Structure formats: C-alpha cells, structure tokens
Image (tube, rainbow, N blue to C red):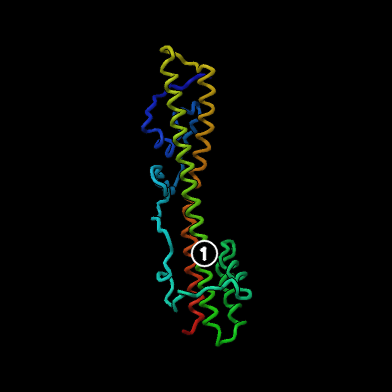
C-alpha cells in the first residue's frame, strides 16, 4: 500500500474528525462537486468536551407553569386507574400519530364524558399526559448523553490510534513511501473506526431535535385540552 504524505497534529485531530476526512484516510478524498444555487449551512461542530452535545440549551425538566394556565395539577394523580385514560395518553404521546389525529382523539374522548365531569377528566388527562411526555423527554435526553459519552470514548481511541501510527511512521527511513504490514493494518483499523465515529456523529443533530419535538407536541395537545375546559 502506498502511503500518502501527511503531517500529524494530534491536538487538532478531534476537530478534524468533526469537519473533514482525516489525512490518515489515504486516497479517500471525495472528488469536488460544484453545486449551483443556495446550499444549507453546515451544522455547528459538536462540542466533544461537553456531556451535552446539542446546540439546543439543556433544560433539565419541563415546567407545568410554562405551558398550562388551568387549575393546578399538584396532587392530581391516579390517571392510570381511570378507564380508557392510559390508552388515550399512550396514543397522544406516540410521535408517529399525527398531532391532528391526537387532537381529534381528545375531542372524541370529551364527547363521551358527562358535561359536569369534563373539566375534572380533562385535568386528569393533562396531568397524565404531562407525566408521560415529561418522562419520554427525560429518557431521550439521558440517551443523548449516553450516546455522547460513547462518542467521547471513540474519539479518545481514535486519537490514541493516530498517535501510534504517527510514532511508527516517524521511525521509518526518510523517503519511505510504502507502509509496513503493521502500519497498514493499524491504518485500516483506524479508517474503519473513524467511519463509524463520523456516521454516529451525523445522527446527533437529529437526536437533539427529539426533546424539542416532544415539547412542541405536548404544548399543542395542552392547548387542545385547555380549550375544551370551561374553568
């Protein structure tokens, strides 16, 4: 295998992994393609020193007061014991169900409740929905942080591998253009690990949108519930 000339700068390795292919990827550069017209801006680099990789500010927990101006839900519990309530909340909190369909499900539910009980049942519905979706959001955020932790470990391992390759290359006779079998094997391992790292990095911005989508869905359904109440 012929080695492409390159220079190692270890402190910059992690940044290079986030914005461009590594110089260790011999012969892997993609051909330049000119694209006419407006292009989407590249996402900002992911901060590998932080436990939270998202550009969205981390808010630990949702506030009821921020989305709800109705009666207090403090002490409102037992929604899971209400007939049909658990199934309805499961449907409402499922993101693959369109918001419009979820809103219609709320209206259909209310139509089957006696008028004098509607506010009570809707308050219970909101309490359960908030509990359910706040839990979903916490789970997603915890998953993002675990994902980031695994990526940080991968980044450190890539840095270690690149240091080993650079050290071995520094011991080669001047003018050497061929990799030794040992270096070739290490380079192949590095290239594979880097591809996995970069593919995983590309999914982080999408994952970071999930807490926002949960919040937006909860807010929309909260407005529907509140709009059907008389008090």
Residue 133, percent across and down? 51, 64
Q: Position of residue 61 (x, y in %)?
A: 43, 61
Q: Which residue is at 44% across, 76% downward? A: 72
Above or below, comparing residue 60 to residue 191 in the picture: below
Q: How many discs appear?
A: 1
Q: Residue at x 46, y 84 (%)?
A: 231
Above or below 117: residue 66: above
Q: Residue at x 38, y 29 (%)?
A: 10
Is there any visible trace of residue 229 in the rendered image?
A: yes
User: 137 or 178: which is nearer to us?
Assistant: 137
Where does residue 183 sit, x and y in percent of width and height? 50, 20
Apparent side of residue 166 relative to residue 115 in the rendered image (left or right): left
Q: Is residue 38 shown to the viewer in this render?
A: no
| Rendered position, 10 above or below 212 | above
Q: Is residue 120 above or below residue 39?
A: below
**Residue ranking furthest to the bottom:** 116
Q: Is residue 227 left or right of residue 97?
A: left
Helix, strand or loop at mark 1: helix
Residue that badge 1 annotates = 133
Q: Residue at x 46, y 42 (%)?
A: 35
Which of the two residues, 142 or 163, is positioned nearer the viewer here? 142
Image x and y of residue 28, in percent: 50, 30
73 or 42: nearer the viewer: 73
Pointer 1 local density, CA inside 10 Å: few below 14, some 14–19, many at least 20: many
């Amino acid at each position: 295998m012929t080695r492409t000339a390159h220079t190692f700068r270890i402190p910059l390795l992690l940044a290079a992994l986030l914005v461009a292919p590594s110089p260790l990827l011999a012969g892997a550069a993609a051909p330049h393609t000119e694209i006419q017209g407006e292009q989407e801006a590249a996402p900002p680099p992911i901060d590998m020193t932080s436990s939270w990789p998202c550009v969205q500010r981390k808010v630990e927990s949702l506030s009821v007061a921020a989305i709800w101006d109705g009666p207090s839900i403090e002490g409102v519990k037992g929604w899971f014991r209400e007939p049909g309530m658990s199934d309805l909340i499961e449907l409402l909190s499922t993101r693959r169900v369109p918001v419009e369909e979820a809103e219609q499900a709320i209206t259909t539910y209310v139509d089957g409740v006696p008028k004098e009980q509607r506010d009570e049942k809707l308050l219970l519905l909101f309490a359960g929905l908030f509990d359910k979706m706040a839990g979903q959001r916490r789970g997603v955020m915890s998953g993002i942080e675990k994902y980031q932790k695994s990526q940080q470990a991968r980044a450190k391992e890539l840095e270690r591998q690149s240091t080993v390759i650079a050290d071995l290359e520094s011991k080669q006779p001047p003018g050497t253009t061929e990799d030794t079998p040992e270096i070739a094997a290490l380079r192949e391992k590095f290239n594979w690990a880097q591809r996995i790292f970069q593919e995983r990095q590309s999914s982080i911005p999408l994952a970071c949108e999930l807490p926002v989508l949960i919040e937006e869905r909860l807010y929309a359904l909260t407005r529907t519930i509140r709009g059907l109440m008389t008090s």
